[in-house]
Image (spheres, rainbow, N blue to C red):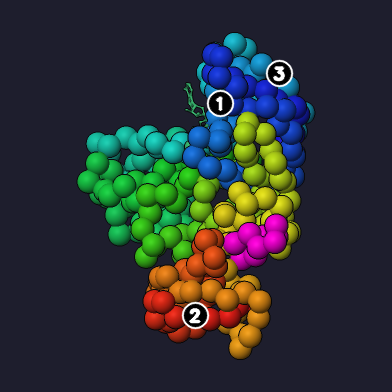
Amino acid sequence: MLQVKNIHFSYKKKTVLKDISFKAEAGEYIAIIGESGSGKSTLLKVLRGEYDLNKGQVLWKDEDILGPKFNLVVGYDFMKYVAQEFELEPYISVEENIGQFLSNFYPEEKKQRVAELLDVVELQSFTKTKVKLLSGGQKQRVALARALAKQPEILLLDEPFSHIDNFKKQSLRRNIFSYLKKKKITCIVATHDKEDVLGYADKMLVLDNNMIVANNTPQELYSNPETPLIASFFGEFNIINNEIVYSYQLKIVAHSNLKVKVVQCYFKGNYYLIEASLNDEVIFFEHHSAIKKGEEVFIK
Ligand code: ADP
Ligand code: MG
């Protein structure tokens, strides 16, 4: 189990993490979400012992994760980390990058292991390609496979799918997260993409203003978003009579006390997002078909 106990961290004078505490059981996936600059990457770096804490403690099982003041080499064998700006060896092949830290003493096992990971990240056809010739998204997939090569107990991922295009993203997420569950690898992922969280994460930590403002299951936070920040993570929403209402929760009706005027209509695939004005306020709701600008409708 990972235990994070009341940690405080600042870069020189600038406090980034204030009194952060949470736990992750073996095999659990914890998503860390928050706006850009909220401290997600810093938290992951602190978890791997890249910095010395001002206060608090990070424990993996019974082992203290310590910063550079106490450790000559940053990082631990049981923990792998893939940074937002991942680093690879550009002049060697994909398979050599993935297998770089695997023993050459068992060539058959090494080959099999690399092949298994190439499957997970769907890079079978690039086995022999030099990494410098890959796209950003392909490089990110190599970085993920490399982190998994020597199976870690805990994996820290910083925006792991940010460079990967939408064509590949969905199947890659399914592969990676089911692989991690199957192997019971604890995983902490910093992200601002709800697609990385919904359907996969066991818990979701929300960072705001240097602190954890929510720690719950994605289902619970989605159903009861306590703050606009949490609601905005999941989608378009409105505040009506001090209540957070997602755009999909509003429907057009024959009559109601909410009469709005359509301002803009956005095609979203299986629905249209309608931007409308209610007096001076902007209201978003969803509808199955397009509505003309200027039309007045009632919503509920
Ligand atoms: P996020 O990953 O959520 O976007 P970061 O952890 O990267 O946030 O950054 C949190 C805050 O710490 C930001 O205000 C950022 O400018 C600052 N920061 C990040 N890295 C450093 C650093 N090496 N030195 C000083 N300040 C930093
Ligand atoms: Mg970041």
- Residue bounds of the magenta highlight: 238-246
Give the main secondary structure, helix, strand or loop, of the magenta stretch. Answer: strand
Tell me residue 153's x, y (percent). 63, 41
Is 44 magenta? The answer is no
Tell me residue 228's x, y (percent). 62, 52
Q: Secondary structure at mark 1?
A: loop
Name the residue located 41 percent from the left edge and 77 percent from the top edge.
294
Seen in the image, is 202 located left or right of residue 277? right
**Is residue 179 visible from the viewing direction of this image?**
no
Residue of label 3: 55
| Rendered image: mark on residue 296 | 2
| Rendered image: mark on residue 26 | none
Residue of label 1: 75
- Few, some or many residues within 10 Å of mark 1 (<14, 14–19, 20+): some
Name the residue located 70 percent from the left edge and 57 percent from the top edge.
242
Nearest the camera: 281 or 159?
Answer: 281
Depth-wise, is mark 3 or mark 2 nearer the camera? 2
